[in-house]
Amino acid sequence: MKKPEKNSDVTDNMRMLLRGREAAALCGCSLRTWRTWESLGFTPQPIHVGCAIFWRYKELEQWIDAGCPKRDDWVCRAKKSK
């Protein structure tokens, strides 16, 4: 797999959208574990762009800081804070 070229505006580890492997690394788990958590509804809601699946970097940071609640609890918290 070819590594994407660096963009001067965004560093590799601070991109706005992360793929599963990057999200898993941010959370300190394997891609397989991340996919399992995602299928069980343990992760924040992903963003689908065509066939690709992404997670928002800032949302993952907030989710981790909140103790990694299940998706239903996280969505409910996000709505209450707006």
Image (cartoon, helix red, strand yellow):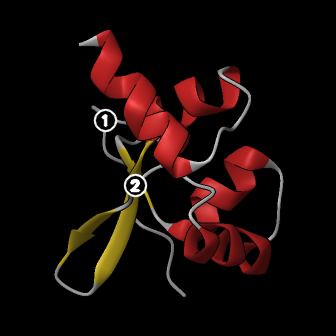
| Residue 29 lies in quadrant | bottom right
Looking at the image, is mark 1 or mark 2 earlier in the sequence? Answer: 1
What percent of the width, then of the height, locates residue 8?
31, 35
Foreground residue, 7 or 67?
67
Residue 5 visible, this angle: no
Q: Residue at left 39%, top 38%?
A: 75
Foreground residue, 79 or 13?
79
Q: Residue at left 27%, top 31%?
A: 9
Q: Residue at left 69%, top 46%?
A: 26
What percent of the width, then of the height, locates residue 18?
45, 55
Residue 39 vertical position relative to residue 70 in the rendered view, above or below? below
Q: Identify residue type, mark 1.
A: Ser
Quarter holding the N terminus is bottom right
Q: Which residue is mark 1?
A: 8
Q: Residue furthest left?
A: 50
Residue 7 vertical position relative to residue 37 in the rendered view, above or below? above
Nearest-to-viewer mark from 1 and 2:
2
What percent of the width, then of the height, locates residue 76?
40, 32
**Label 1 crowding class (10 Å Cα cut-off): few <14, some 14-19, many 20+?**
few
Foreground residue, 69 or 4?
69
Q: Identify residue type, mark 2.
A: Gln
Q: Which residue is mark 2?
A: 45
Q: Residue at left 55%, top 68%?
A: 20
Drawn side of residue 79 relative to residue 24, left or right? left
